[in-house]
Image (tube, rainbow, N blue to C red):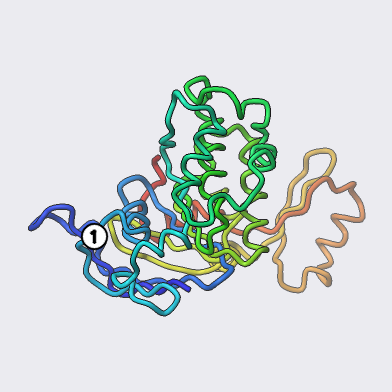
Amino acid sequence: MIQVKDLRYRYKKGGPEVLQGIHFSIAKGEIFGFLGPSGAGKSTAQKILYKILEGYSGNIMINGKDLREWGKEYHEMIGVGFELPNHYLKLTGKENLEFFGSFYKSGSRYNIKELFEKVGLEHAMNEPVENYSKGMKMRLNFIRAIQHDPEILFFDEPTSGLDPINARTIKELIKELRCKGKTIFITTHHMETADQLCDQVAFIANGRLMATDPPSKFKEAHGMPMVRARTQNGDTREFPLEHIGQNREFLHFIQGNPITSLKTQEATLEEVFISITGETLRP
């Protein structure tokens, strides 16, 4: 669906390369995460892919066609959820959605009320957006991106500014879109969000792509092959994961004590990112 080879970009002629020859591919129906701190080049790469930035070097193929050859029809097949919501504040949420939907030949392919219900904004659809909180604007931003039922979706920090309940709602909706065969490209510095959503993640730091793999492979490769068991009275012990079922010490420990937790010692995505890139995930 999306293939990127040797992508390079400078904001100013003679200035530093903010993207330094990155390569990646995204399959149809896949959620791909671009992970890194602010200034790493995540948003720049997305802006090139949805044709806001030009003047890049390298090769980008979308559905087998060079990105440079796509015209206005390209915007019919993509949806973009920007990190900073940009709405018309004097218009209501419904009027905003109707206005932006008019840009597409098909208009909105969803019932507008149902879109607002999906993100818990049905009570505010006829309110001016200037009265919306940041989280409400983010949710409006999300349904605006999906309203024309695009094949490819770009989300920049899709859970930014959301409380845990609404963040979970957005994550579940993104998973539903994947089930419908949508190709989704997410940029974020929130490793938990990436871990929960992405089929593949790529670590980017200082404009260079450092590694790409499924989250589970990253965590397994950088974790310890150990099991940590905790008992009801607070005792904690670690045992080698290999042949755990035949480990006499482990069996004796769990038989003699009520176990409250049993966890493998895999690394977190954030730990893996720091190990590979040497960077911290500052916002």
Q: Residue furthest bottom?
A: 64
The residue to which callout 1 is attached is 54
Q: Taking 128 as reference, is 178 left or right?
A: right
Please tell me whether residue 69 is drawn above or below residue 118 in the rendered image. Answer: below
Asked if residue 243 shows in the view, the reply is yes
Q: Measuring 26% from the left and 61% from the top, which residue is drawn there?
A: 19
| Residue ID at (48%, 46%) | 102
Residue situated in front as seen by the camera: 93 or 214:
93
Amino acid residing under circle 1: Glu
Q: Quadrant of residue 235?
A: top right
Residue 51 x/y as whole percent: 32, 59
Residue 269: percent from left, percent from top: 53, 55
The quadrant where residue 116 appears: top right
Q: Could you say where residue 229 lies in the image, as x and y percent from the top left? A: 76, 52
Residue shown at 41%/64% (left/top)? 73
Q: Is residue 283 left or right of residue 184?
A: left
* Residue 14 location (% of width, % of height): 7, 58
* Residue 6 position (above or below residue 254): below
